[in-house]
Amino acid sequence: MRSDQLADRICGATRLLFAVCLLIFTFAAVSGANAQSSVRPPSSGDTGFSDPAVSGQVPGNSLGSASDAELWRAVKGGTVGTVSIPDKKAGMLIQYEGQIWREIRNGPLPIYGAWAILGMIVLLAIFFAVFGRVKIGEGPAGITITRFSALERAGHWMTAGSFVLLALTGLNILYGRSVVMPVIGQDAYAAIAQWGKYIHNYVAFAFIAGLVFIFFHWVLHNLPSRHDIVWLMKGGGIFFKNVHPPARKFNAGQKIIFWLTILGGASVALSGWALLFPFTTSFMTWGMEIMQTVGLDLPAWLGLPDPPYTGVAEQQINQIWHAAMGLFLTAVIIAHIYIGSLGMEGAFDAMGSGEVDLNWAREHHSLWVEELEQELDEDAAKHGGSSVQPAE
Ligand code: HEM
C-alpha cells in the first residue's frame, strides 16, 4: 500500500470514529434529558437559576466541572418548580416546613402536653390533700330534687364516654411508642395502636354528636350573668368553709367548663376532620383569615406565616392544633371529672340518678332552687302537687 493511500484510510477511519463518538454523545445527551424527573426548577430569574453563579456552573468555566450546591439549597428551601403532571404539589421536592412540624411534633408538643396533664393531676392531689372533699355544709336534707333528665344525662355520658376513649387513644398516638411499647412489647403495642386508631377515628363522630346535643340543651343556662362576677370574685367559695356565692343552674366555674368544652371540642373536631379527610379542607386558612379580619393576628402570635396555606401546610398546622387542643382539653376535663366525683360530696348524683340533695342544691345553686321553688309553688297552686320528694 502506497503512503498516500495509507494516509487516506487513516483519515477516513478518524472521520468514522468522530461520527460514532458524536452519535454516542447525542444519544447520551437525549436519553439523559428524558431520564430527568418531570419536576424541574423554574427557568424564571426569580429563583436566581439564570445566574451562572447559582445555576450549577463554577464561575469562569476554569475546570469545566459543575457544582449544584446552590440549586439543591434552593430545592431544600422549598422552591417550587414546574411540573407537567396534574398534581402541582409535586413541583415542590422538599417542603422545608415539614422539618419544623417534625421538631414541634416530637419536641415541645409532647413535653408541654405531659406537663399540662401531670401538672393538673398534681395540683388536684395537692388541693385534695389540703382542703379535702367539699362537703354538704348543712348535711344531707334527705329530700331530693331533679337536676338533669334522663335525656340530658344520656347526652352528657355520650359526650363523656366518647371523650375519654378519644383522650386515651389520642394519648397513645402521641406517647404510646415511648411509654407503652417498652412495657408490653412491639407486637402487643402494634395491635393496641391499630385498634386505638380505629376507635379514635370512629368514636369522634359520637363526640361531635354529643357536643351538638349538650350545646343545644344547655346553652341558655350558660350565658354570662352578673352573678358570675360575684361567684368568680369569691373564688366559687371553694377555699372557705360555708361560703357559697349564689348561682343559677350553672355557676361561673361550670360555664367556663361548658364553653371550653364547646369551643375547644369544636376546634378539636374540625381539625380532626381535616386530618381524617386530608387535602379536602382549608379550615386553617379560613380560621386564621377570620381571626385577622376581627383584628386578632393569630398567625403572628403563633409564629405562622400569613394565610392562605398550601395543602401540606394545612395538614401540618391542623395536626399540631388538634393535638395541642386535645391535650389542653384533657387537662381541663380531668379537673371537671375530679370536682364532679371525688372532689365534691353529692355532685355525682346529678349525672348519676339525676336527683340531687336539696341542701347540696341550696348551697351550690341557691338561685336555681329559688326559681324551682317558685315554679313548684305556682304549679302546686294550679294542680295541688309538688315534685319535691323525700329521699328513699
Ligand atoms: C368521665 C367522668 C365525668 C364525670 C364523673 C362527670 C360528672 C359531671 C357532673 C356530676 C356534672 C353535673 C354538675 C352539676 O350538677 O352541676 C357534669 C356536667 C357537665 N359535664 Fe361532665 N363528667 C365527666 C366527663 C365529662 C366530659 C369528658 C365532658 C366533656 C368532654 C363533660 C362535660 C360536661 C359539661 C359541659 C357539663 C355541664 C357544665 C358543668 O357542670 O361543668 N363531662 N359532669
Image (cartoon, helix red, strand yellow):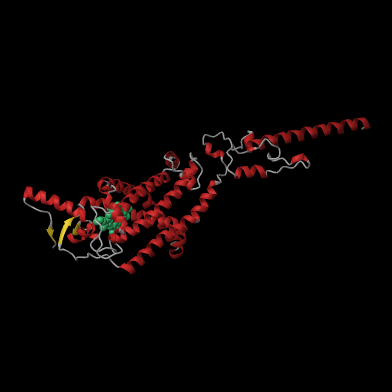
Residue 93 point in image, percent of width and height: 57, 42
Residue farthest right in this picture: 2
Q: Return the residue nearer the eye: 73 or 367.
A: 367
Q: Return the residue nearer the eye: 26 or 177.
A: 177
Instruction: Answer with the quarter of the image where residue 285 lies.
Output: top left
Residue 115 point in image, percent of width and height: 44, 60
Residue 11 point in image, percent of width and height: 86, 32
Q: Is residue 28 left or right of residue 111?
A: right
Q: Return the residue nearer the eye: 141 or 323.
A: 141
Residue farthest bottom in this picture: 129
**How many labels, in total?**
0
Q: Residue at x 24, y 64 (%)?
A: 242
Q: Return the residue nearer the eye: 2 or 132.
A: 132
Q: Residue at x 16, y 52 (%)?
A: 372
For the C terminus, give its image quadrant.
bottom left
Q: Residue at x 8, y 52 (%)?
A: 385
Residue 335 point in image, percent of width and height: 34, 59
- Measured along the vertical axis of the image, is residue 10 above or below residue 250? above
Q: Is residue 363 visible?
A: yes
For the N terminus, give its image quadrant.
top right
Q: Is residue 94 left or right of residue 377?
A: right
Specify the quarter for ligand 1.
bottom left
